[in-house]
Amino acid sequence: MVNEKRLEFFKSLLNEQMKELVGEAVKTVNDMTVTEGEFPDPTDRASWESDRNFLLRIRERERKLITKIGEALTRIEEGAFGICERCGEEISEKRLEARPVTTLCIKCKEEQENLEKRGIP
Ligand SMILES: [Zn+2]
């Protein structure tokens, strides 16, 4: 079981990441608002469109990560943090430090990736 002190550590780590992501997301939205409505010629318009798509993609990724961080914080509250949701084994501290939002131990993660490679969900 991950001890209380470690939980506090992961909690503040996750909160920090969350704050950063939300800050980035807000910045992205502001950038888009500033750029919008200013494309004097079609070439500029095209590059603006691709920029915008790029920003939207980043936002999508950020949004997913924000959701994951939220779920990890919930697991900390529920005492389920650091437990693999597939096999119920403890996830190694090293793995949690590298990726605190993870819900799978390294063994299950590898199994899942192998299945995905073979096209099995
Ligand atoms: Zn597992």
Image: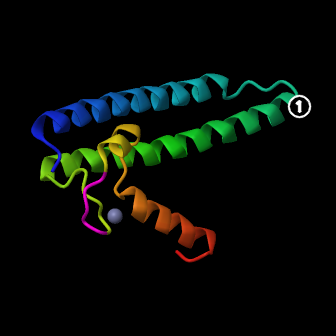
Residue 5 location, x and y as percent?
13, 33
Q: Is residue 57 left or right of residue 67?
A: right
Q: Within the magenta stretch, is there residue 56?
A: no
**Display colour scheme:** rainbow
Q: Is residue 95 left or right of residue 117?
A: left
What residue is at 14 percent from the left and 47 percent from the top?
A: 77
What residue is at 24 percent from the left and 44 percent from the top?
A: 73
Q: Is residue 91 left or right of residue 2?
A: right
Q: Is residue 78 above or below residue 15?
A: below
Which amino acid does the dot numbered 1 rest on? Thr
Q: Which residues are magenta?
A: 87-91
Determine which quarter of the picture holds residue 48: top right
Determine which quarter of the picture holds residue 70: top left
Residue 37 location, x and y as percent?
70, 28
Residue that sits furthest to the bottom in the current view: 120
What residue is at 52 percent from the left and 45 percent from the top?
A: 61
Residue closer to the observer: 47 or 38: 47
* Ligand 1 sits in quadrant: bottom left
Q: Is residue 83 above or below residue 33?
A: below
Determine which quarter of the picture holds residue 33: top right
Q: Is residue 11 left or right of residue 25?
A: left
What residue is at 14 percent from the left and 52 percent from the top?
A: 79
Residue 54 location, x and y as percent?
67, 38
SS category of the residue bearing label 1: helix
Q: What secondary structure prevails in the magenta region?
A: loop
Residue 107 location, x and y as percent?
41, 62
Which residue is denoted by mark 1 in the rendering? 43
